[in-house]
Image (cartoon, helix red, strand yellow):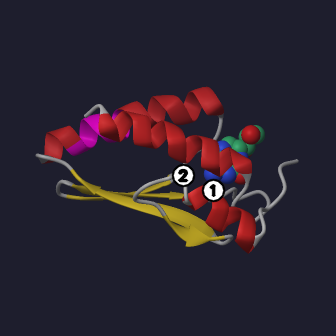
Amino acid sequence: MAEVLTAEAVRDELGGLAGWSGDPAGITRTVELVSFLDAIAVVDRVAATAEELDHHPDIDIRWRTVTFRCVTHSVGGVTMRDIRLARRIDEIVESA
Ligand SMILES: C[C@H](O)[C@H](O)[C@H]1CNC2=NC(N)=NC(=O)C2=N1
């Protein structure tokens, strides 16, 4: 089972994840897309990636603003699975 990262480890990992913030309880990134449909398209791609990784972000959609929150629910904190998912979300957002 993946281990919850320490506060220091989360800080270090956030250094390589522009736009993300948080702590061992969860990391979040909010992005504003051009339109609602663009936001939904990004969410759709993230959903496919989450299935591939078998690791799923919490997602909040408000018109064209989307907030992704990554935390490993089974252990109640941020693990490397969340860091990997966050990197993949960034790739999708950057290519949108
Ligand atoms: C069996 C499967 O790996 C688990 O149910 C997964 C699915 N996706 C998940 N996603 C997240 N964010 N946390 C989990 O604990 C989790 N568990």
Residue at disc 2, secondary structure: loop
Instruction: Give coordinates of residue 38: x percent, y percent.
Output: 19, 39
Q: Is residue 40 magenta?
A: yes
Q: Quadrant of the C terminus?
A: top left
Taking depth in this image into account, of 94 and 43 the one nearest to the observer is: 94
Which span is picked out in magenta? 39-44
**Residue that numbered label 2 is attached to:** 16
Q: Amino acid at mark 1?
A: Glu
Percent x, y of residue 44: 36, 34
Q: Is residue 9 left or right of residue 22?
A: right
**53 left or right of 94?**
right
Say which element carries label 1.
helix
Q: Residue at x 65, y 35 (%)?
A: 54
Number of numbered markers: 2
| Mark 1 and mark 2 residues within 8 Å of each other at the beta carbon | yes
- Type of the residue with mark 2: Gly
Is residue 10 shown above or below 53? below
Mark number displayed over residue 13: 1
Q: Nearer the viewer, residue 80 or 66?
A: 80
